[in-house]
Amino acid sequence: MKISLEDALNTKGIIIDIRDNESYKVGHILSAIFIPSNELIYHYDRYLNFSDNYFLYCEYGTISEDVARRLAILGYHAFSIIGGYHNYLLRG
């Protein structure tokens, strides 16, 4: 499932940066937490619950779309931010 950047920023939920640690340190969406994609895929139950919305992003939205789809299949309210971090940077 996909969501626009604006909708993700204006909807109650948790924004998750699934890129690598170095990318997160260089820059990330304000208020985003960092959970690498592999950690989120294999240990989702450590981080997620079924009542919250989760807005995931990677660099361009491709990997986060796959991870969000996997989590949605498990019953989580997971969405991929269209365009990822690159879209956020273009927003200025």
Image (cartoon, grey):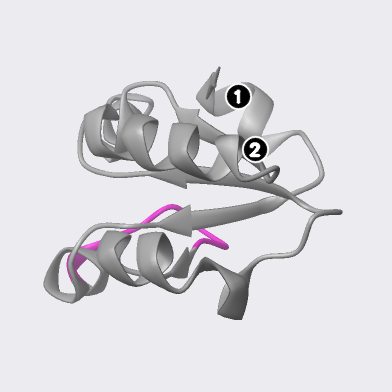
Task: Say which of 53 and 66 sits in front.
Answer: 66
Residue where numbered disc 2 is placed: 9
Q: Secondary structure at mark 2?
A: helix
Q: Which residues are magenta?
A: 26-32
Q: Residue furthest right?
A: 51
- Quarter of the rendering containing residue 27: bottom left
Residue where numbered disc 1 is placed: 6
Q: Give yes or no for residue 41 being in the magenta stretch.
A: no
- Residue 38: x, y in percent? 27, 65
Asked whether, in this view, residue 78 is left or right of residue 22, the answer is right
- Residue 26: x, y in percent? 18, 67
Q: Residue furthest bottom?
A: 46
Going 29% across and 30% down the picture, which residue do you hit? 61
For disc 2, the neighbor class at 10 Å (few under 14, some 14 to 19, many from 20) is some
Work out how far the residue at label 2 is from the one at label 1, CA to CA, in angstroms.
Answer: 5 Å
- Quarter of the rendering containing residue 22: bottom left
What type of secondary structure mainly makes up the magenta span?
loop
Q: Disc 2 marks which amino acid? A: Leu
Q: Disc 1 marks which amino acid? A: Glu
Decide: is 32 above or below 11: below
Task: Say which of 72 and 82 sits in front.
Answer: 72
Do the CB atoms of the residues marked 2 and 1 lie less than 8 Å apart? yes
Task: Say which of 34 and 74 sits in front.
Answer: 74
Q: Quadrant of the C terminus?
A: top left
- Quarter of the rendering containing residue 19: bottom left
Q: Quadrant of the N terminus?
A: top right
Task: Say which of 38 and 23 sits in front.
Answer: 38
